[in-house]
Image (spheres, grey):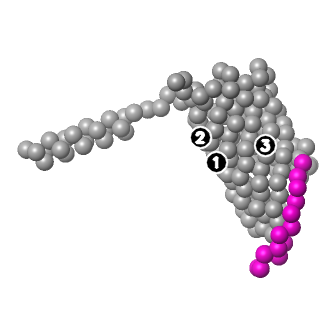
């Protein structure tokens, strides 16, 4: 009897946990163009990776219409650990300043691999994750997580097109 009660309680608690849903809103920012980079480059050769370098980079842009936080100014500051033609790992921060002055900041981490493109040449494929770390004004208490992909434009290698998706919610104390 005691064992049956324990198993029943465990099942009820487990089902309750699985049935809990999050009242989050989707976050979707597509085609965000970050350009005008400022950067500091440090060549740092390693044994077996003689072309290794590090880059501290700052880029700016505007969130396009049709996206969450449309018309917000976006600024990214990131650290890139670069093995040219092979891998790039990085981390950094994105801050969005909305037209009303409210701000949201998120931390991001990404990985880049160079894979064959349609023309047979190696091209970067960049994916990452983001976590909201804070907000101001009406967005104070915001939380969220998601992922992103970065694409480059053939016309300008300094332009990065960001596509972010995920979930967010403002949690009031």
Residue that mark 3 sits on: 76
Over which residues does the magenta segment extend? 38-51
Q: Which mark's residue is nearer the viewer, 1 or 3? A: 3
Q: Is disc 1 in contact with disc 2, using a CB cutoff of under 8 Å?
A: yes
Q: Can residue 60 be seen in this view?
A: yes
**Residue 166 x, y percent position in the rendering:** 60, 38
Residue that mark 1 sits on: 129
Q: Is disc 1 in contact with disc 3, using a CB cutoff of under 8 Å?
A: no
Secondary structure found at label 3:
strand
Q: How far apart are marks 3 and 2 (CA)?
A: 17 Å
Q: Can residue 85 be seen in this view?
A: no
Secondary structure found at label 2:
strand
Q: Is residue 49 covered in magenta? A: yes
Q: Distance between the residues labelled 1 and 3?
A: 14 Å
Between discs 1 and 3, the one toward the N terminus: 3
Q: Is residue 47 covered in magenta? A: yes
Which numbered tag is attached to residue 145?
Answer: 2
């Amino acid at each position: 009897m005691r064992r049956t009660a324990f198993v029943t309680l465990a099942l009820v608690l487990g089902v309750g946990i699985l049935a809990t849903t999050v009242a989050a809103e989707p976050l979707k920012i597509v085609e965000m163009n970050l350009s005008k980079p400022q950067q500091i480059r440090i060549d740092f050769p390693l044994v077996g990776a003689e072309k290794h370098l590090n880059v501290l980079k700052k880029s700016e842009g505007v969130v396009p219409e049709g996206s969450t936080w449309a018309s917000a100014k976006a600024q990214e500051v990131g650290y890139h650990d670069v093995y040219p033609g092979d891998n790039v790992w990085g981390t950094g921060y994105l801050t969005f300043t909305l037209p009303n002055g409210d701000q949201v900041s998120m931390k991001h981490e990404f990985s880049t691999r160079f894979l064959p493109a349609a023309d047979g040449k190696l091209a970067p494929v960049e994916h990452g994750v983001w976590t909201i770390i804070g907000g101001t004004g009406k967005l104070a208490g915001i939380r969220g997580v998601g992922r992103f992909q970065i694409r480059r434009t053939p016309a300008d290698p300094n332009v990065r097109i960001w596509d972010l998706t995920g979930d967010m919610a403002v949690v009031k104390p």
